[in-house]
Amino acid sequence: MTTADPLAERFRAMWAELAGVGRDPATGGYLRYAWSTAELTCREWFTAEAVRRGLAVRADGNGNLWADWVPSGVDPAAPAVVTGSHFDSVPHGGGYDGPLGIVSALLAVDELRERGFVPARPVTVAVFVEEEGARFGLACLGSRLLTGGVSAAHALALTDSDGVTVAEAMRAGGADPAAAGPDPDRLARIGVFVELHVEQGRALVDLGAPVGVASMIWPHGRWRLEFTGAGDHAGTTRMVDRRNPMLTCAHTVLATEAQARRLGAHATIGRISVRPNATNAIPAQVHAWLDARAADDTALATLVEAIGADAAARARADGTSVAVVRESDSPPVAFDPDLTDRIATAVGARPTGAVPVLPTAAVPVLPTAAGHDAGVLAGHVPTAMIFVRNPTGVSHAPNEHATDDDCAAGVRALAAALADLAGE
Ligand code: GLV
Ligand code: MN
Ligand code: MN
C-alpha cells in the first residue's frame, strides 16, 4: 500500500487556490494576460502567500514582483539565490506553464524552513510580468525591461489587440509606467537564478524521470507577415481579376510547414488577422504571425528566409505583396554548464532528512525550444532551469499537466538546488 506524500498533498491544496483564476470553463484553458484581472488576482494571491511566510514583497518599476527571505544576520543587499516564473498565459493555455515555478518556489521555501535550513544569503521568489507576450506581442517583457533588453520607450508603447498600451495597462494595474526600464540595482542583487518549469514535451516521460535540468534553449523569434491585396466583392469579382492576400497567406502557411520539416526546425503560423473579415468580401489585408525556432542561429535565419522567399514568390503570382516584419528575437541560450551540473548533483544527492529525488546519474539534462525568463537572465547572471515531467507532453493548451507527485518531486529538487546554492 502506498502512503500519500504529504508534500504532494500540500501542493494539491495550494494549486486548488489558483485553479479557477482566469480559467474558461468552456475550454478548460486559462486567459491570464499580463495586467488583466486574472493575472492581478494571481499576483495578489502571491503577495498574500509571501507575506504569510514573512517574506518582504516588492514590485520593481517594471511590475515584476520580488519576495525576499532574509534571515537575521544576512546582508539584505547580498546577491540572492532567486527562483520564480510567471503567471501570465497564452490564450486558452495550460495552468502549469509559469505558475508551477512560482507555487513550487513558495513550497521549496517551506521545505527548507521545515528542515531547519537557514540560508547564508537572501533567497528570493520572483514573478515576471508578460512572459508569454500573449497580450503585447513581445515575450519576456518583464525580464527584458529589467535587463535592458528592450527600452522602456519601446515597451510602454506596445499595444494589445484593443489598442491599449503597456503604459495604460500598467497604470490600470496600479503600477507607474514612469518607473519602467533597466534596473541595474535589482539585477546586481541576483546572484543566481533557477527557474522551475513544467516540461513542454515528452522527454522526461520517455526517460521515466520526474524531473530534469535544462542544457540550452533554441534560438527563436516572431515575425509579422503582412499580406496586402485588393478588397472586393466576393460575388461579383471574376476569379481572374482577384488579388486575394488570403491565398498568399494560405500558401505561406503550407510553405512554413514544408520548410520547417525540410530543415529539421519548428515553425508555426497560429494567429491571423483579416481585414475586413467579412464572409462576402475578398480580404484587402491579412496579417499572419510566424513563430520560428531552430537549433542554431544559422538554421533559424535559413528557415525564415526560405519562408519569406516562398511567400514573396506566391505574392507575385497572386498580384499581392508581402512584408516580413520581425517582432521579437530570442537568441540561443546555453545555460551555465557548471551550475547545471551542480544542480543535477544537488537534485540527486540525499540531504539529511530529505527524500532524494533521483540518483544523480538519472537526472536528465535536456535542451528545449521554449522561451523563458531564465533565457533572458542567462545573458546576465548564472542561470539554470529544472523541468517537471508532463505526462501529456502538451503545453500552451488546456491538457498541459503534471501529477501532484511529480510536482512534489519538483519542489524537492528545487529545495535541494536552493539549499546547495544558498548554503555556507
Ligand atoms: C514561451 O512559452 C514560448 O516559448 O513561446
Ligand atoms: Mn509558455
Ligand atoms: Mn513559461
Image (cartoon, rainbow, N blue to C red):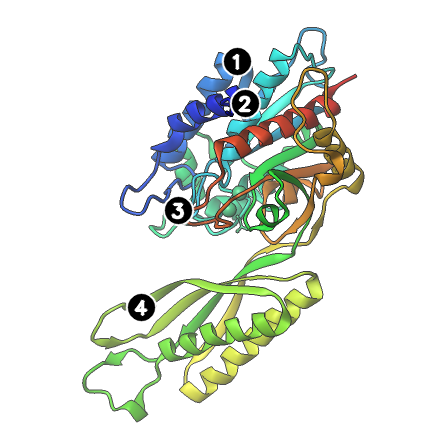
State yes or no: discs 4 and 2 in contact (Cβ < 8 Å): no
Amino acid residing under circle 2: Leu
Q: Secondary structure at mark 1?
A: loop
Q: Quadrant of residue 414?
A: top right
Cα separation between marks 4 and 3: 29 Å
Which mark lies nearer to you, 4 or 3? 3
Relative to residue 29, is residue 317 drawn left or right?
A: right
Amino acid residing under circle 3: Pro
Cα separation between marks 2 and 3: 24 Å
Q: State the residue position of label 4.
A: 275
- The reply to whether residue 199 is in sight is yes
Residue in view at x 55 percent, y 39 percent: 142
Q: Position of residue 83 (x, y in %)?
A: 62, 29
Residue in view at x 43 percent, y 39 percent: 95
206, 106: nearer the viewer: 206
Cα separation between marks 4 and 1: 51 Å
39, 6: nearer the viewer: 6
- The reply to whether residue 172 is in sight is no
Q: Is residue 125 above or below residue 138?
A: above
Q: Position of residue 388 (x, y in %)?
A: 58, 38
Q: Secondary structure at mark 2?
A: helix
Q: State the residue position of label 1.
A: 53
Relative to residue 279, is residue 393 drawn left or right?
A: right
Earlier in the chain: of badge 4 and badge 3, it is: 4
Amino acid residing under circle 4: Arg
Earlier in the chain: of badge 4 and badge 2, it is: 2
Q: State the residue position of label 3.
A: 398
Which mark lies nearer to you, 4 or 1? 1
